[in-house]
Image (cartoon, rainbow, N blue to C red):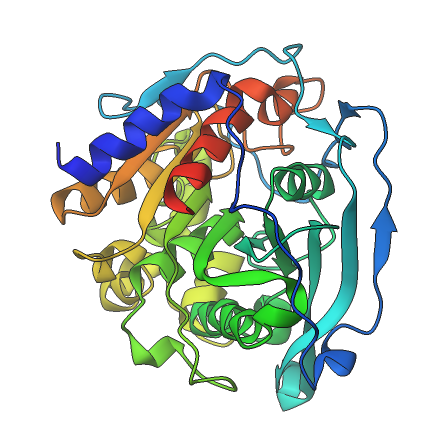
Amino acid sequence: MNGSLRRILVATTLCGLAVAAGPPAGAVAAPGPDAATAAPTATTAPAAPTADCPAQPWVGGLRLATSVAPDDSRTSTVLHPRADGPKMQCGAKETTLRKDITYATVPGAGGQPRELKLDVLAPTTGGPRPLVVFLPGGGFVTANKSGSLGRRTHLAEQGYVVASVEYRTTRDEATYVDGVADAKAAIRFLRAHAAAYGIDPSEVAVFGESAGGYLASMVGTTGGVQRFDAGAHLDQSSRVRAVVNWYGPSDLAKLAADFDPATRAAHENSTDSAAVKYVLGPNDPTRLQDAPAAVAAADPATYAGPGDAAFTHFHGTDDRVVSPSQTVLLHHALLARGVPTARFALKDAGHGPVVPEGDTSARMWETQHVIRPLTAFLRWQLH
């Protein structure tokens, strides 16, 4: 085990300790000359008695597998969160939310201009703070930056500036190249406006859920790949120091590898699924199984190498949307190439809020048992 990986794993043992996040408090820098258009409005959420954070809503419309193969947890840390365990807390500190900040204008569906927006949630006082760029899930079809408010609020109260970013999906006739470029454009924009938002531009992490976890992983391994950097603020770096991957795919041709035969066959034989369109484009009638070069080019493991950001992966062992082996594959590829990486397997947890009707395992993802290793990792990587 290399030294960097050992430090990540040791950091998880801090999860039960009260360790302050972020640098010492200081004055927030004054907005830059274009901050008036970058951040037109802001609202402050006053501190309230500490309470459970808002729950993440269930997202429907996805095919769920009927069975999942046993998780390969030999190189992972297995967590046993309880659905009724203590929840992450919000409301202890004031935060400021700035919504609908345009960070890029790009071609959308039919080539029409599309404004991409982000929300910035930050501690009301102190700065500059480390930045966590949050990429929401949505099956490569949607990217709702308003989701996971409780988790984003909890991180902001730990001392981070949290920017939730929308990105192009198949509804925009986009591919993964566009999605990764959007995530990187947001990072460059936030670095260019670091003073306006109280950000320490040298301390940046990216955190994604599901499809957002896939894009976060791509951002983490393509720091030196110019193909994915396009648009404005190219004088700024899109590299990050840390990646948090929550149940994101990696090898999209094997998305259903752990599932029952019928679900696996449906994925493997599809020529029009969102995953197919996000790799090959909106009009290509090819199966991913028949396009190995394109699938490899869309796999974050393809680009991994020494000097990449440190990773931590979280995956439920009963995930019926993205096979748990997807994070195993990426985790093992990173290990083989000398990238610091750790993986947490949540026993009996599903795909975040997307679970069969009546299943309470979605609540596991909101518990302190799961959130503490995440915040310990960020504390260790963002100084």
Image x and y of residue 172, in percent:
62, 74
The residue that appears at 12% across and 31% down in the rendered structure is: 1
Specify whether 189 is left or right of 113. left
Taking the image as shown, residue 332 lies to the left or right of residue 10, namely left
- In percent of width and height, residue 87 lies at 67, 19
Return the x and y of residue 352 as percentages of the image width and height: 59, 33
Question: Is residue 136 visible in this depiction of the protein?
Answer: no
User: As drawn, is 292 to the left or to the right of 190?
Assistant: left
In the rendering, at what x and y percent does residue 367 appear?
61, 21
Q: Residue at x 58, y 67 (%)?
A: 170
Residue at the image point whose x is 67% and y is 10% from the top: 84
* Residue beneath the point at 47% across and 12% down: 80
Q: How many marks?
A: 0
Q: Above or below — where is 88 with respect to 238?
A: above
Q: Is residue 244 visible?
A: yes
State the residue in front, 104 or 7.
7
Question: Toward which corner of the image does residue 239 lie, by quadrant?
Answer: bottom left
Quadrant housing residue 98: bottom right
